[in-house]
Amino acid sequence: MEDFERRKLKKWIVLMCILLVLVVLVSMRLTNITVKGNSRYTAEEVEEMVFPDFWDKNTVFCLVKEFFGSHEELPFVQDYDIQLTGPFSCDLVIYEKSIVGYVRYMSSNMYFDKDGVIVESSQETLPGIPEVTGLNFGHIILNRPLPVEEEGLFNEIMNITQQLNYYGIPCDRIHFDQSRNVSLYLEGGNIIAEMGPSREIDTRISVLNDMLPALSGKKGTLDLTDYNESDREHVTSFRLRDDQETE
């Protein structure tokens, strides 16, 4: 009888220990989440997308899901890592897709990377990402290169966007004509900068950056097509919308 009572007591102890462990595991929640690598979303938006449900913030469930499960698919995000830094904290590291521009197709914005691969289709217009017009392409398939015939075109686009970012020049649209001359649409289209061929565009964007403060609040076309670093006499003119010419 005494052995029976002893065994029964041991079972209750084991059961209570199991329940205690379960309570502890359930109560362990990620309350301190540090988001890193995000630029297109706020930390709050990222946290809500990655941890949409109650159980997603449970430390144990999160650890198991991170090890065995798949990640949520987030627009404009290539992938992310959840790095536990403690029982109640983690680092959420975001790896955003590299996007240099977009084209309009079938009422959607088709965003592409430096290699011309379509990485996202969205109705949303991302700030700081220019539309690219004047390209000739057929059908567009997500995660496939934009089908254009012009060789080296995406290297040109990448170089233009890098130069614009370097000088901090916001650009709404990059347009290529049939001869691959470049026009930049700035300040909501109020300023159109005709840049000529892209082979000399680095220097011309530098000149554009120097001239923009004097054009603030104006509407017109800045002609930089004849600008030559070795011949500064061909600097160009700014044509107002009413065709009045000013130097």
Image (cartoon, rainbow, N blue to C red):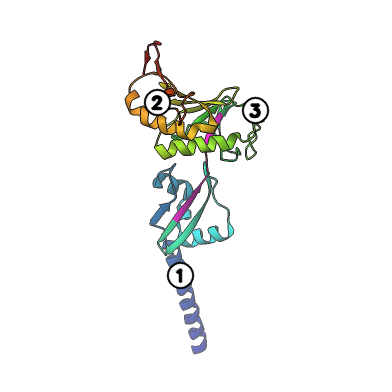
State whether residue 120 appears in this view. no
Residue depicted at 36% across the width and 27% down the height: 212
* Marking on residue 21: 1
Which residues are drawn in magenta? 92-103
Q: Seen in the image, is 106 located left or right of residue 23?
A: right
Kindly identify the amino acid type of the residue bearing the numbered disc 1: Val
Kindly identify the amino acid type of the residue bearing the numbered disc 3: Phe
Classify 10 Å Cα crowding around label 2: few (below 14), some (14-19), many (20 and above).
some
Residue lying farthest to the bottom in this orientation: 2
Between the residue at mark 1 and the residue at mark 3, the CA separation in whole angstroms equals 60 Å
Element type at mark 2:
helix
Q: Nearer the viewer, residue 170 or 92?
A: 170
Q: Position of residue 114 (x, y in %)?
A: 56, 40
Q: Position of residue 190 (x, y in %)?
A: 40, 21
Q: Which residue is mark 3?
A: 137
Q: Which residue is mark 2?
A: 187
Q: Position of residue 37 (x, y in %)?
A: 44, 50
Element type at mark 1:
helix
141 above or below 15?
above
Q: Main secondary structure of the magenta part?
A: strand
